[in-house]
Image (cartoon, rainbow, N blue to C red):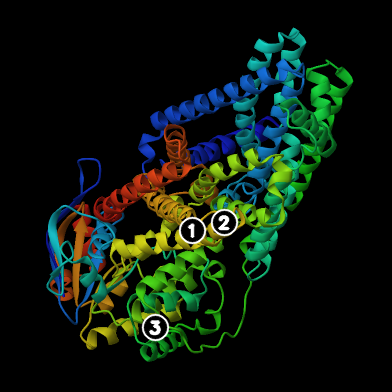
Amino acid sequence: MLKITNFSKSYKSDKKAVDQLNLEVNSGDIFGFIGHNGAGKTTTIRSVAGVLDFEEGDIMIDGISIKKDAVACKQKMAYIPDNPDLYEHLTGIAYLNFIGDIFQINKMDRETLIKKYADEFELTQNLGDTISSYSHGMKQKLAIISALIHRPKLLILDEPFVGLDPKAAHTLKTIMAGLCKEGSAIFFSTHVLEVAEKICNKIAIIKGGKLVSCGTTEEVRGNSSLEDVFMELIEE
Amino acid sequence: MEITMKKVMRLVSVQLWAVMGDMLSIGNNRKKKPKMLYAGVLFFTLLMSGVSFFYSLMIGSGLKMYGSLELLPAMIMAVTCMIILMTTIFKVKGTIFGFRDYDMVMSLPVSTGVIAASRLIILYALNFMFVIIVMIPMMIAYGILAKPDILFYIISIVSLFFIPLLPIVIASFLGTLIAYAASKFRHSNIFSILFSLGFLVVIVVSSFFVGDNGKELVDMSKALTRQTNRLYPLARMYTNAVVNYDILEFLKFLGVSFVAFLLYTILVKRVFKKMNTLMMTGSYHVNYQLGQLKTSSPFKALYFKELKRYFSSTLYVINTGFGILMLTIGSFAIIFVDLDKIFGSTQATDALVKGIPMYLSFCIIMTCSTMASISLEGKNIWIIKSMPVTPKTVYLSKIAVNLTIISPAVIDTIIIGVVLKLDFWKTIILLLLTITCAFFISFYGLLMNLLLPNLKWTSEVVVIKQSAASMITIFSAIGYIGIQFIFNILIPSAVLATLGYVLLTVVIDIILYVILMNYGSKRYYAL
């Protein structure tokens, strides 16, 4: 579903934020992407989502290069950034309907899925309010709902659990597992190693822009905990 | 006390640099800050000072011929105050109330009074810079023409510090009222937009009719000065102080300005937290029930999203919709007034008819929402960039919104054609002018914003009014009207001159469209 090949990205300075990254996420995978601050997680995720331009390497979504056909790639995926900055002047429902129009979701599916996910995240009663009145957690929930209503084949999330209350975090984890059972793939970054260890079947650890470990959760952690492995790798 | 002042000044310096950085659109590249900022500020200062000096010299020379040079300081001062008033109304929200880094600043270990003071000083500093840029060149021009006593310079320089005070106070009251109403009631932005537009229209229209009985510059200046003195007594005090060296009037001028600002400062300090909280808290509607949803195409969805964004900001509407409003008022006004009576003769009416194409293109070119539409995406840019839509669709939706805003111009043009009894082909040429200019400014504004985006702004006022993209778009577009003026001089036939200008604009429209869809698409991914 997602194949990153020899991907490098540098900003204006010579130092590479991400250097020769290779990884693959298949249908049904919940792929955790771990690294400390500034390791290159967000740069990678933003490039996969088509938000950031890049020169070296390639990113394929369901066999299509994002460089060659960005629109086709974006039609298959959904992205939620680490900070859900949404259109503050719109109401929650207007934003969801806007996303529905952009992804051309039919009327019936749109109404059904908005109801389903808004109820699950307990946001239905606030959908008539403008987003400017939402708390950070409510905005995060709205961003998640907007990502789910078009049934993406690939869901890309940057720190999705930040700002969510424990119940909403649990709901999201359940939905993520359900999506993968249906054949979608999830690629997400997190600092919460316990969550990664619990829900991911694959994990990659990035340090200084380079992949230092990648494989199934069992392969990466071996006989230790993910936290021990992570600390060991980043201190090397 | 000393520590408090240090805190205030530290806050002012940090926030003022941020505002000026935003103004020059270096928000996307903070490393460029010092060099670009200094160069930008210097260029802007020199340009504005030069314009002010030549205006003052020209008007002053005219007044001197009629022995009324003493009107010059008051005229320039009144214009300065009027500009401060009009611009500050929309700076209040974003500078004193409802600014974006409010949470961060309020969490600092400084008192609310210190923060409120720092915000007021920013507002004062921005306006004071403007006063210096306009008034000092006027003083030099007046000095050259009138060769006044040294006392003129002393009084004028001291007055500089006090000139912006009262306009700031008046504008702040009006601005706060507008911003508060907009934050309090649902759909109240319409009220806010109408109120603001109405206020501006009253100012502009009343300035048209102020010179009641004279055609001569001096008569008009005298009438204008009389009117200004009646409306704004501080202008009279200022004139008496700087021209007649009346120390009592000078002290009155300083006293009124200072006391008004002092009272205002005390009031702001008291209501600062309360007003900011009120403005940042939206209205809640509990128990929303999901109903039927309307579906539309991606283009339509983007178009309506953009249109809602446009009408969600009073500042955006006022600054980009004023041209079309003036055109509409003008075109409806000529239905009801006898032009021959107003302008005195048929020749004057003829001159007016010849000036119509330039008035049309000027009003249309002043209507440009696209020059800020990319920057206004701000932190939300990730939404459109991660969507399955091409840059072309996004651009066309933004262009379509500007064309919608300009669309009343088509009716205005037809009205002008009918009222001035233009023949069919002349009306068609005017319509072509309207349409080509509408496309020109929509394309050009968008291209400028793509070249000079600022996605890291903290207050939308700097993007809409003071960013490099907005300023360059407006100033260079006015320059483009200069080409129309040259056409009018070089080609004796007004019809042929307008037709030539229309053809040139068509060619430029095509070139701009091609650039936008090719180079512009590449810029989209680099944003």
C-alpha distance separating marks 2 and 3:
42 Å
C-alpha distance separating marks 3 and 1:
68 Å
Question: Residue flagged by tag 3: what amino acid is it?
Answer: Thr
Mark 1 belongs to which subunit? Answer: B
Q: Position of residue A197 (x, y in %)?
A: 25, 74
Mark 3 belongs to which subunit? Answer: A
Q: Looking at this view, is B435 or B29 the one in front?
A: B435
- Is A88 above or below relative to B478? below
Q: Tell me what residue is drawn at x 41 percent, y 82 percent.
A: B295
Asked if labels 2 and 3 share a chain, the reply is no
Count neighbours of disc 3 (C-alpha within 10 A) and say few if under 14, some if 14 to 19, many if 20 or more: some
Task: Determine whether, in the image, residue B368 is placed left or right of residue A48.
Answer: right
Find numbered disc 1 in the image and state the secondary structure of the residue it sits on: helix
Question: Residue flagged by tag 2: what amino acid is it?
Answer: Val
The answer to which image quadrant residue A163 occupies is: bottom left
The answer to which image quadrant residue B70 occupies is: top right
- Is B435 above or below relative to A102? above
Q: Looking at this view, is B418 or B507 the one in front?
A: B418
C-alpha distance separating marks 1 and 2:
33 Å
Residue that mark 3 sits on: A171
- Looking at the image, can residue B334 be seen? yes
Q: Position of residue B259 (x, y in %)?
A: 82, 35
Residue that mark 1 sits on: B424
For the residues carrying marks 3 and 1, which lies nearer the camera in this image? Answer: 1
Residue B317: assigned label: 2
Asked if labels 1 and 2 share a chain, the reply is yes
Q: Are marks 2 and 3 in contact (CB under 8 Å)?
A: no
Question: Residue flagged by tag 1: what amino acid is it?
Answer: Phe
Count neighbours of disc 2 (C-alpha within 10 A) and say few if under 14, some if 14 to 19, many if 20 or more: many
Q: Looking at this view, is B269 or B403 the one in front?
A: B403
Q: Position of residue A171 (x, y in %)?
A: 39, 83
- Is B362 above or below relative to A71? above
